[in-house]
Amino acid sequence: MKILLIYFLIILFQLTITKFGEARQPKLFKINLDKPPRERWKSVIEKYKDNVIPEIAAMARSYIPTNLRSPIFGFFAKIVHLLPHDYGEEIIGMAEQLRDTEVTPGELVVFNILYDLTDFSHGPFLKNNKSLSLGCTSIVAAQNNGKILHGRNLDYEMTQVLKDATILVDFVKNGKIQYTAVTFVLAVGIITGQKPNAFTVSLNARYSGGPILNILMELITRFKHPVALQIRKTLEFEQDYVSALSQLSWTYMIAPSYLIVGGKDGDGAVITRDRLGAVDVFTLDYRHYRWFLLETNFDHWKKSGDNRRKYGRKFMKEIGKENLTAKLMFEKVLSKWPIKNGLTISSTVMSAEEPNLIYNWTVVWGN
């Protein structure tokens, strides 16, 4: 009976996403943390070595003037040993597997700290002054019983390439899932993830400061705390919502960010960060009036620069706390314009209390 129920839910989900346009569920991989770091991503590299990976590398190169590629990628190849040990070793392992391709170790490092370098999009060394535009909408919301749903739309400029590269990954140790991520091929860091029965987290871009401040922070931290790698470290080592919230609030990181964290029993927060730590931690109060928080890419106490916040809040209020489900959050909020827009790569609904949601409600959108 249980098998029939699971089959029914899968069919229902497939019908649902078809209703909202072409979409697919990302391929699921298992990364065994008991293996040496350099061996962990072999199955992913083998799967995408001949198609998606060259696309990612070509796209990354296209943003850098030809005459600057060698020194820039050469520099970043040398700093791989400064990254947190296991994660740097994982990148080295990828580079070894890709030795017979045109993908260089420096390109892999740049791709893995791309968020931390986005302020450089306004600098003179990016080709044609191109911009690496990262958007995103994240929502943490409480149902009547306090169960938290965490919705997330990932928007990014390199849309089609990253759609092709989107995967789901279970990180496993001693045969048990430690944490799960919606991530990209070649990315060892995490920008959307959950630790089962503990907490969920997503990253939204915050634009504050510029390249000089990023360079200074890179020197201070010695490249130890790129944001996506710090999120993965938190998922790996912190055991509950409170410790995760503290770690994500007060660890020095290279770039500003919004970190949206969901827990259990009504716990949820939006951390607005600069490079040194939190400048604001906005929390749920579901028993009273604040039963959901919605973050785009603007400080919640300031005027929004676009209409995603306005419409997202409207859609959530139309559902109501009493009626909120993963299905309604997906259909009535994440799938509707302008929350879903031309830059939207994927949508996810997850919950620390119901870990299977991330598999059932993660989609990569078609064209």
Image: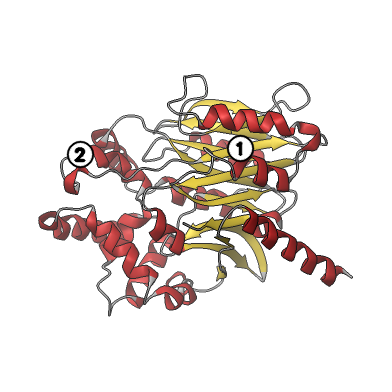
Query: Which residue appears at 51% of the width and 48% of the height?
Result: 231
Residue at 43%, 47% in the rendered image: 343
- Is 48 located above or below residue 144 in the figure? below
Element class at badge 1? strand
* Residue labelled with disc 2: 123
SS at badge 2? loop
Disc number for residue 139: 1
Q: Residue furthest right?
A: 1
Residue 303 vs residue 201, the one in the foreground: 303
Q: Is residue 70 left or right of residue 305?
A: left
Q: Position of residue 194 (x, y in %)?
A: 62, 51
Q: Earlier in the sequence, mark 1 or mark 2?
A: 2
Q: What's the amino acid at mark 2? A: Gly
- In three-dimensional space, the C-alpha distance between marks 1 and 2, rounded to whole angstroms, equals 32 Å
Q: Is residue 251 visible?
A: yes
Kind of residue sitting beneath label 1: Ile
Structure colour scheme:
secondary structure
Disc 2 residue crowd, few under 14, some 14–19, many 20+, Cα 10 Å: some
